[in-house]
Image (cartoon, coloured by chain):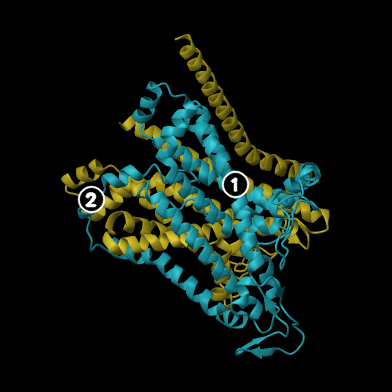
Chain colours: A yellow, B cyan
Amino acid sequence: MSYEIRDHKKRSASRRIANIVVLTLSSLALLVVIAPSIWIVVQILREALPHFSFSVLTKNGVGLGGGLRNEIVGTLVVSIGVVLLAGTIGILSGIFLAQYARGRLASILRAASDILAGIPSIVLGYVGYSALVVGFHWGFSLGAGVITLSVLVIPYIAKTTEVALRQVPINYIEGAEALGFKPTRILSRITLKTALPGITTGLIVAMAISVGETAPLLYTAGYSQNLPKLTLTHSPLGYLTYAVWTFYNQPTKTALQLSYDAALVIMVLILLLIGISRIIVAQTQRHAETSR
Amino acid sequence: MSIVETSAGDAKNDAEGRFQPHLLGRRTPIAIVSAIATTVPAIAVIAVLLVLFSKALPAIKYNGLHFLTSSAWNPGNFYANPVVTNGVEHPILAKYGVWPLLTGTLESSVIALIFALPLSVGAAFIVAKKLPPRLRSLAGTFLELLAGIPSVIFGLWGALTLGPILSKHIYPFFAHHAPNIIFFRLFRGNTGNGEGLLTSALVLGIMVVPIIASTTRDLISAVPRLTEEGAAALGFTEWEITRKVTFPWISAGVIGATVLGFARALGETMAVAMVSGAVLGTVPHTIYSTYSTIAAAIVTQLDSALTDATGLAVETLAEAALILMAVTLLANVAARYLVKRVSSTSLPIGKGL
């Protein structure tokens, strides 16, 4: 009898120790996972802030120095272009996939979207280069850059739109139908309106991707130290990620500083976008709770 | 919604079929326009394949099957008169092989997962099971931030901060103390300046953590409470519940997320181009060796390839891109199959941010 009790105690001690060991290791894993994001942000601040002057934001690049105005404007122009082009196509395709698509055709279109999302961005960049820049004789241009990046983000926007639309409660639609709303009116007044926060966050993610992508732009948008021309073809333009990639290993100190300055501006833009999407989500959740 | 989209949460809505399509007009203009928009991804996929294949065709003819096994990366003499072989014009002595790039791509991604998988699952376990709601959302914010950091900034940090620190303080220890026997031998030798296989695999590992961790976290939270409570009532410890009840429940989804992370690591370009040392034509012989991947080679080589007047260098990059696409596609299809087994709607998680 006493033997059995001791055995039980011994086993439970080893079980408890195993439990503690696993919990400790997992907590360490969490710290290791969180550390790099803080480290990277702190490192950029440490390298960029001591030399930072606001003239960096207002001057164009000159050789390996100067400012980042051309890159900042370029990044904004490209992102807005992507939100307009990919946003239109992506939202429409999300509407179709959520509302109309059924059966075999739908699953083929969905699979195509998934396959596109899995293509490495540099492959899209290469194809954009050979098809648009060389094949269509557009040269390095805003048009080639925006189209290549749009192809990259359309699957995201389509998917987030589809999911947002699917989450609209069916009672809303049935209620509207009972009131005699026409289908198109239900779509615009009820479904899309309710799904708007989800769709918007999808667009914000697309914008964050456009701000941070490099590989699809290098050989489509090219580079220029002037402010971007707003023509679609033969209009090479600068963008922030280009500055990080090109200036980080140049021999001069100003180039390295410019690289870190560009990284800082990128991180500020991305944090801003993450912040906005958080606010939208928080607002929607509050709204959802009170309306229930 | 977050930058890291996950597939676990949407399963229910889809299965319940909340949406009744017959409520909405099928012949309205919006239905027709949106149907046309939905064909864009399909057209894009076909266009990508057509462009790549037609670009690569001369290179496939010239390089032949040796392309897969050869280690050479010699663009040939651009200044001598071009020669014609197999009907393809090429610079004299041009010889290409994708073997080092292919092994570099696979090795770095596998090593990345060896780091990322246990870290992600451990972190997800703590976040889902132990943290109070407020800290849970804070941890979620950090994962989101990690997912939102662009590849080129990971590259900057890996090349100028992480790499030098590791090669100065950490790698020499392993290099001196690793026994000179099989496998451990890989850890011996010159540790370089921090640019190389191990550093870039570490950076890649950090980059895929958000994909695996956020999916695992959501999957753990979606496990029915009753089954876990049943195990707790039987006297299981938390670890035993996790090992015997939670993990078997979510394993397919976690493997799916891991393979998606693998696919992302395979195609990752900028970070690898900045941290790998971007050396072509040699297979890495220690874990610190400089090397390159297919994606990184395309971005670093395309510029100089354009100076090949015969076009063979550019065409060879298209051939390499085709191989990269085949490998990532395989990984993606496998991942989606595994994720589909646990949820019906899978978001395109883990594509290059």
Left or right, residue A162 beside residue A229: left
Left or right, residue A264 beside residue A191: right
Dots 1 and 2 on the same chain: yes
Choose between A184 and A92: the one closer to the eye.
A92
> To which quarter of the image does residue A234 belong?
bottom right
What amino acid is at disc 2?
A: Gln
Please tell me which residue is depicted at 48% across the width and 76% down the height of the picture: B50
The answer to whether any part of residue B346 appears in the image is: no
Q: Distance of mark 1 from mark 2, alpha carbons?
A: 44 Å
Q: Position of residue A202 (x, y in %)?
A: 45, 50
Q: Position of residue B265 (x, y in %)?
A: 58, 54
What amino acid is at disc 1?
A: Ile
Secondary structure category for the residue under label 2: loop
The mark nearer the N terminus, 1 or 2, is 2
Please tell me which residue is depicted at 61% across the width and 32% down the height of the picture: A28
Q: Position of residue B320 (x, y in %)?
A: 59, 70
Q: Point out the frontmost of discs 1 and 2.
A: 1
Choose between B63 and A57: the one closer to the eye.
B63
Kindly identify which chain the residue marked by label 2 belongs to.
B
Tag 1 residue? B114
Left or right, residue A47 beside residue B331: right
> To which quarter of the image does residue B34 belong?
bottom left
Q: Residues within 10 Å of mark 1 (few under 14, many from 20)?
A: some
Residue B20: assigned label: 2
Left or right, residue B231 beside residue A41: left
Secondary structure category for the residue under label 1: helix
Residue at the right extreme of this rendering:
A252
The quadrant the C terminus of chain A occupies is top left
